[in-house]
Image: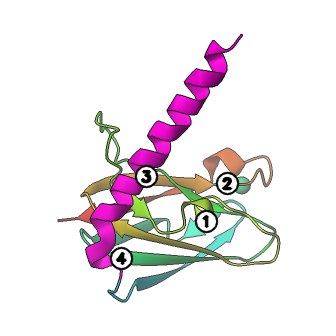
Amino acid sequence: MQKPVVLVAAFAGFLMATYWMAHAQSSGNETAAPQIIEVSAKKYEFTPAEIHVKVGARVELRVHSEDETHGLKLVAFPEGTKDKSKPGLLFGPPDQNGKVTKGVDQVIDFVAQEPGTYDFKCAKVCGLSHGKMKGKLIVEE
Ligand SMILES: [Cu+2]
């Protein structure tokens, strides 16, 4: 039963290489000051529910919860994309995307590399209408 382990290891290696390459490409943007966007979260909506940024912008979303713990999770690929080799959004610390810590504002840092519409949703099951708690990030040319 060696094979599955080898496959998993190979896949993990592939993911790390992909991540590293994606990151290497972004080094030109690292020094630019981020565009800070405050987002408030409460049952069951984000405000603003639609966020517009320009392509190439480095963005910092600061998600503050007004009632109980929520979290914002952004899809890295634009709606309708078939090419999953290069994410349209490049996250700084990727573990912050969708991370939820009670009582702590969430900060998500990314570079908007490709124009398109990116869905986001609540990352924590917060009640009956949790599934409806979502929004859109629109990256404009
Ligand atoms: Cu929720």
Does the beta carbon of the residue at mark 4 sit less than 8 Å from ligand 1? no
Of circles 2 and 4, which is in front? 4
Of circles 2 and 3, which is in front? 3
Marks 3 and 1 sit apart, C-alpha to C-alpha, by 15 Å
Q: Earlier in the sequence, mark 2 or mark 3?
A: 3
Q: Which residues are magenta?
A: 1-30
Q: Earlier in the sequence, mark 2 or mark 4?
A: 4
Does the beta carbon of the residue at mark 3 sit less than 8 Å from ligand 1? no
Looking at the picture, how far across and down is residue 126, in whole percent? 79, 55
The quarter of the rendered structure image containing the C terminus is bottom left
Of circles 2 and 1, which is in front? 1
* Residue type at tag 1: Gln
Q: Quadrant of residue 34?
A: bottom left
Q: How is the image coloured?
A: rainbow
Does the beta carbon of the residue at mark 2 sit less than 8 Å from ligand 1? yes
Q: Earlier in the sequence, mark 4 or mark 3?
A: 3
Q: Which mark is residue 58?
A: 4
Residue under circle 3? 19
Residue under circle 1? 96
